[in-house]
Amino acid sequence: MTSTSIDAELRPLSEVAQKPPRSTPGRRPRRTVAIVLGILAYLVTFLIVLPLFWIVLLSFQPSGNILGNPFSFTELTFDNYINAIGSLPLVQMYSNTIFIALVSVTVGAAISFMAAFALTRMIFRRRRLQSALRFYLLAGLAVPVYILLFPVYRLDLSLGVFGTYAALILPYIAVSIPFNTLLLTGFLREFPSEIEEAAIIDGAGLWRLCWSVVLPLMRPVIATVLIFNVVYVFNEFPFASILINNPDMSTISLAVSRFKGQYTVDYGAMMASATLVLLPQLIIYALFQRHVIAGMTVGAVKG
Amino acid sequence: MIWISSRWKILLMLAPALIFFSLFIVYPVLYSLGFSFTKFQGFGTPEFIGLDNYAALGADPFFWQSLQNTIVILVVSIALLVPASFALALLLRRKIAGGGALRALVFGPAIIAPILVGLIWVFILDPKIGLLNRVLGFMGVAPIQWIGGDTLTPYAVSLVFIWSSIGFAMTIFYAGLQQLPHDVMEASALDGASGWQQLRFVTIPMMKETFAIVTILMITNVFKIFELVFVLTGGGPVHRSETLVSYMYFVTFTNQQYGLGMAIAVVVTLLGAAVSIGYLALSRGRRTA
């Protein structure tokens, strides 16, 4: 994991808060307390990360040892990984997931952006209608996906897309709209319109205005939207479990859910498989960690 | 921007989002609501039976069991998670060597797919092969049926939920703490407030908004817990560790009692909304009082 801190992202908001506290006479810093709390911080972090280490450690154990003597690390082996790679369609599940994420996130963000632009920047003959439509889309935030599972399954059947990637892509796009609308309209509302007015005077049409003028200015909030949506699609399980019946089309979550049935006795291979799925995600997280955390926080605080 | 706001241009910009949203969110919600008043087994035409499904739920012990489990998870998780993540944010806000890395590590579990989280914890909580019982065994404690037993599973699910959410909740608190006005903090320190008094009378009152956000987010997330139960116990033994959502999944898709399943889905939705609104009303009321 990288050592870059998330402070970098949060600092601009709170330059003042970073000033070292003034040392007040009579309240000298109690060093022992500081040291104890520092150790405590490391200890708690270690406890939180422990489950991940445990899986990785066990994945190098011969299966017999996992059941018999999991704490002996004298004979370590790569056998589990050889077994796992032999039986795990890693490339396929990743490419399925990446394809579905790519299409649904791009389309979802694009149409949410268009809607957010219309809802904040365009002039309606009836203003009431504009805020009513915004509220309509935002109401989706209160809908739990579980109530959608069965109807969407039926809908996919009657639209004739069941068994195709579109079966998942379409609901993923829809589910992303309320949250995207919340972030994008929130951002656009507080955003000055002078640049757009200048562009219009210079003769930019609607298309140019949206994609070449406004969109580039919204880069930070668009990044948040994209990260949030990609994490959602990568982790999504309930829809995938119902709308995908062809094993060749399994997404990552769906493939992971089959591990328990697939390796009923071979715990070693199961843990090696889990590690193989876990590591790429952790590496990507380590690379983008600053943006992921900042994006998640903005999303949560605004949400 | 009047001249780019012709009616058809507005429509063009809004239409895709409205179509997707109406077709895949609004229509399904109404569809579920409608189905909850019918008897449907997957073939033939649904038969309208009024409120019979809801009455059937009232008489279904498994439904009550899963409701009870959900409430246990809700109470245990929120009661532990909110203070713990706030304390962690306070702890990780201090100047510690490598503090940024610690915050990143603590957040890590929040991006792991819930289904994978469940799988990881099988190897810790499983009564036979799990780490926890092994460690307890060294200390001479007899094996404990953390998951799959009669009573402990909802608590174990809470534990796993807390593990996967604590970094996220901590980060929101951390961001909130960073935005506190520093002059207020300094003034209270100059006035001679001790660390504890400052926390109790300055920091926490100013963080009310953040506490409300974290709590609401975690409440809604508890109502979504499904994958953890699915992987840890599959809802067993005999539905004793089911949550409302996992039981709804079982009734609808495994048992194919679609009408009954949709009735549960409607109840879950209303319950989640009611708890969230209730909490918001409560915290608003406290603020004005």
Image (cartoon, coloured by chain):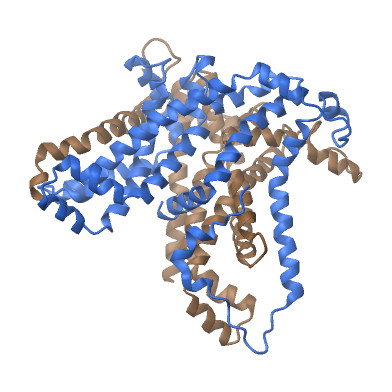
Q: Position of residue A218 (x, y in %)?
A: 32, 50
The image shows residue B124, relative to residue B106, as above or below, that is above
Task: List x then y, in percent, for residue B70.
Answer: 58, 41
Which chain, by letter, is blue?
A
Observer-nearest of B266 and A241: A241
Q: In the rendered picture, chain B carries what hue?
A: brown
Question: Where's the C terminus of chain B, which quadrant?
Answer: bottom left
**Is residue B112 visible to the viewer in this orientation of the structure?**
no
Q: Is residue A143 left or right of residue A95?
A: left
Choose between A20 and A181: the one closer to the eye: A20
Residue B220 in the image, given as x and y percentages of width and height = 49, 45
Q: Is residue A173 left or right of residue A211?
A: right
Which residue occupies the foreground of this view, A279 or A190? Answer: A279
Extreme-bottom residue of the structure: A25
Residue occupying image coordinates x 67% and y 85%? A27
Which of the 4 image quarters holds residue A31? bottom right
